């Protein structure tokens, strides 16, 4: 198993740090903040409807000016950052990840979760040169070098020329290979009938198992 990461309790640590910061506030700072909140509340409560509308309009004007001052790339970056922040907040609420695959949500980027490590398959195994993930158990691909596959031989002609992609005919074949496959029918293990209704991939004749005739 991969080693546990040290930031599993990041959310709890952040909350603890916030509490400690609040506790470390001086009494004077707390009183000043409380006085500011009371002053703003009283000011908003006593203002007339015209003053209320004027204040809202001034706030909207400041927001419009701020948005206009941002370039197109800045707005995109800000939107991406906001989206990333929302994703992180949503993921941090997923405290229990056990069997979460059965409740998969395509809108959630699970790779951003602090306890999830998703990396590229870029580790080359020394024996068979297979690509593996970091911390993946060794030896599962080739049984620690005991399993050795023979090298693949080049396909015979004309197949080799058709799959190289170096000629016009080869490119045409590769672009239309699916159509070629659907045009070819074959019969396996002596079957001579084609079943098109109530699809059955296999059937028995005198206790012999046959595959139905169909597309490649």
Image (spheres, rainbow, N blue to C red):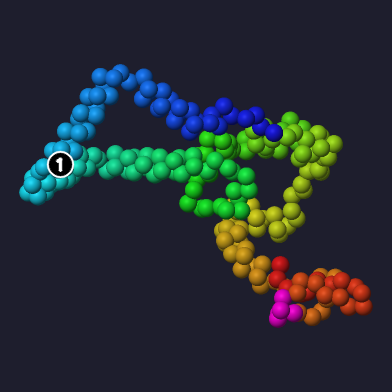
Estimate the x, y position of residue 87 in percent, counting from the top left. Answer: 44, 43
Give the residue drawn at x 74%, y 30%: 126
Residue 214 placement: quadrant: bottom right
Q: Which residues are magenta?
A: 195-199
Observer able to see residue 157: yes
Q: From the image, give the main secondary structure of the stretch colored magenta.
A: loop
Report crowding for label 1: few under 14, some 14 to 19, many 20 or more residues within 10 A (C-alpha).
few
Q: Nearer the viewer, residue 213 or 82?
A: 82
Q: Nearer the viewer, residue 134 or 142?
A: 134
Determine the secondary structure under disc 1: helix
Observer able to see residue 54: no
Give the residue drawn at x 74%, y 53%: 155
Give the residue drawn at x 26%, y 21%: 29
Using the image, determine if residue 78 lies above or below residue 6: below
Per the image, the residue denoted by label 1 is 44
Using the image, determine if residue 203 lies above or below residue 163: below
**In the displayed structure, does residue 135 sit left or right of residue 209?**
left
């Amino acid at each position: 198993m991969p080693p546990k990461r040290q930031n599993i309790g990041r959310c709890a640590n952040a909350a603890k740090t916030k509490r400690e910061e609040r506790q470390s506030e001086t009494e004077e700072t707390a009183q000043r903040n409380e006085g500011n909140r009371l002053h703003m509340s009283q000011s908003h409560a006593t203002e007339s409807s015209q003053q209320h509308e004027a204040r809202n309009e001034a706030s909207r004007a400041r927001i419009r000016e701020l948005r206009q001052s941002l370039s197109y790339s800045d707005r995109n970056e800000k939107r991406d950052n906001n989206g990333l922040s929302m994703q992180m907040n949503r993921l941090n609420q997923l405290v229990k990840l056990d069997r979460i695959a059965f409740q998969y949500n395509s809108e959630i980027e699970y790779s951003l979760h602090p306890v999830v490590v998703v990396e590229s398959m870029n580790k080359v195994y020394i024996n068979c040169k297979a690509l593996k993930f970091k911390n993946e158990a060794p030896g599962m691909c080739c049984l620690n070098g005991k399993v050795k596959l023979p090298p693949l031989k080049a396909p015979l002609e004309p197949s080799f020329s058709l799959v190289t992609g170096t000629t016009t005919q080869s490119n045409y074949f590769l672009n239309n290979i699916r159509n070629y496959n659907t045009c070819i029918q074959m019969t396996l293990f002596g079957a001579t009938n084609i079943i098109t209704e109530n699809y059955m991939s296999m059937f028995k004749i005198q206790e012999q198992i046959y595959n139905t005739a169909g597309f490649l």
